[in-house]
Image: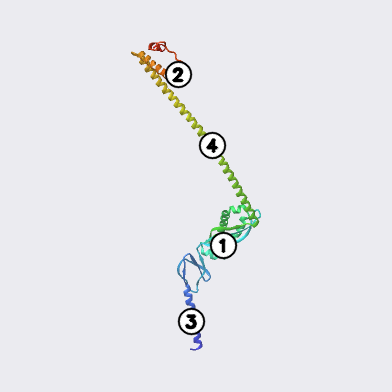
Amino acid sequence: MSKDELLFVVIISVLFIYALQAMIKSLRLVPAQKEFIVERFGKYHLTLKPGFHFLIPFVDRVAYIQDLKEHTIDVPSQRCFTKDEIQVEVDGVIYLQVFDSQKASYGITDFQYASIQLAQTTTRSIIGTLELDSTFEEREAISLKVVTVLDQAAMKWGVRILRFEIKNLVPPESVRQSMEKQVTAERNRRAILQKSVGVRQSLINTSEGFKSELINRSEGEMEKQINEASGKSSEILALGEATAESIAKIAQAISGAGGKEAVKLELGQKYIRALSMLKADNNNKVIMGGNLADMKEMLKGLELDL
């Protein structure tokens, strides 16, 4: 084989391999959550969705590949000055997502870098309007304002800003020490106040308990006296009723036949029984009738006007 023939075979082989590679590259499989930007003769032609696609070799080419999943981008730490001229270091995280692959490819050179730069400048401007204490208290408000500004600009890039979170907000060491002392003093003040409130409440509870005890005792004593008085009243009333009933029965018995004689006999028996119980050594003096055998004489002083 001559040199010319050999050269011709080599050129044909190279062209065949190149054409084969171009044919293979023209068969594109787009994964899920991704889109391919296809250019035809250097001009935007179409956007390939997930699936299998065939491109025209040497005419069409994939210029950009855009990931439609949510991106997490770290915003580097930067120094910002607050309204009261205190320097703080701030960093954060941006969460964004591509919703228009064509705009993300042709609307800006690098939307991630642009988002970082815009987030830093917006954070600086917002913190510059706040005092140091407010920056710690209004982190959520700062994040919301940064998201609003970023989202307005990113719409032109085919990007949606989902969230912006401040990771660290660090004041200078001297300011941090002063703030720690202030927090410690405030904590001690609250502890002392809480202790005094507890002591006061304890004294109030003790006095209220003592007061309740005195009231309960007085009410118990009053109830006791009322019950005793009621008992005595009932006893006196019952005794009076019994005495009245007894007198009524005695009067009824006396008014009957032989009633007077029975009374005299009863009185005489009690008189004799009383005499028998007297003792001589007690110097008791008893007046008796002269004739002890005559009971009528002895009972003469007991005569009743019945």
Q: Which of marks 1 and 4 is nearer the N terminus?
A: 1
**Residue visible at 56% across and 41% down?**
202
Q: Residue 278 carries which label?
A: none
In the displayed structure image, the side of residue 237 where residue 3 appears, left or right? right
**Real-space Cα distance between discs 1 and 2?**
129 Å
Mark 4, Cα crowd under 10 Å, few <14 / some 14-19 / many 20+, is few
- Mark 2 belongs to which amino acid? Ala
In the displayed structure image, the side of residue 247 where residue 65 appears, left or right? right
Q: Nearer the viewer, mark 1 or mark 4?
A: 4
- State the residue position of label 3: 13
Whether pointer 1 and pointer 4 mark residues with C-beta atoms closer than 8 Å, the reply is: no
- Mark 1 belongs to which amino acid? Asp
Residue 79 placed where, x, y %?
63, 59
Whether pointer 1 and pointer 3 mark residues with C-beta atoms closer than 8 Å, the reply is: no
Mark 1, Cα crowd under 10 Å, few <14 / some 14-19 / many 20+, is some
Q: Which of marks 1 and 3 is nearer the N terminus?
A: 3
Whether pointer 3 and pointer 4 mark residues with C-beta atoms closer than 8 Å, the reply is: no
Whether pointer 3 and pointer 2 mark residues with C-beta atoms closer than 8 Å, the reply is: no
Taking the view exactly as shown, the residue that stands out farthest to the front is 281
The quadrant in which residue 211 appears is top right
**Real-space Cα distance between discs 2 and 4?**
64 Å
Q: What element carries label 1?
A: strand
